[in-house]
Amino acid sequence: MSYVKVTYYDGTNEYYENDTIGWHGEERCSFLMNCHLQYRRIKYLPTLPEGKTITHWKQHNKGWRKES
């Protein structure tokens, strides 16, 4: 399993799991493919850095909410 690190314009980072196989066989994050976020950079990571956790989002009636 691989991961992505998303860096936002305010300097915060979030880590997501690549859970979908793309057209050419590469792994992609389904959350990032379905949602349009304003971010500065996405970086592919083969392993999750030590001490970091994956960000989980859940869709509710009024939008997306981050789960802890």
Image (cartoon, grey):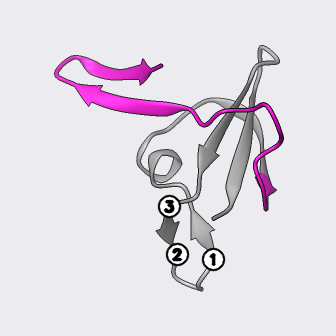
Amino acid at dot 1: Glu
Q: Quadrant of residue 41?
A: top right
- Between circles 2 and 3, the one closer to the viewer is 3
Amino acid at dot 3: Asp
Residue in front for this viewpoint, 16 or 63: 16
Q: Residue furthest front?
A: 51
In the rendering, at what x and y percent does residue 32 appear?
52, 46
Asked whether disc 2 touches disc 3, contact meaning CB atoms under 8 Å apart, the reply is no
Residue at (76% x, 48% y) in the render: 48
**In whole angstroms, how far apart are the C-alphas of marks 2 and 3?**
10 Å
**In whole angstroms, how far apart are the C-alphas of marks 2 and 1?**
5 Å
Which contiguous range is marked in magenta? Answer: 44-68
User: How many numbered dots are placed on residues in this image?
Assistant: 3
**In whole angstroms, how far apart are the C-alphas of marks 1 and 3?**
10 Å
Left or right of 27? Residue 60 is left
Query: Disc 1 marks which residue?
Result: 26
- Between circles 1 and 3, the one closer to the viewer is 3
Residue at (79% x, 62% y) in the render: 46
Query: Disc 2 marks which residue?
Result: 22
Q: Residue furthest bottom?
A: 24
Which disc number belongs to residue 19? 3
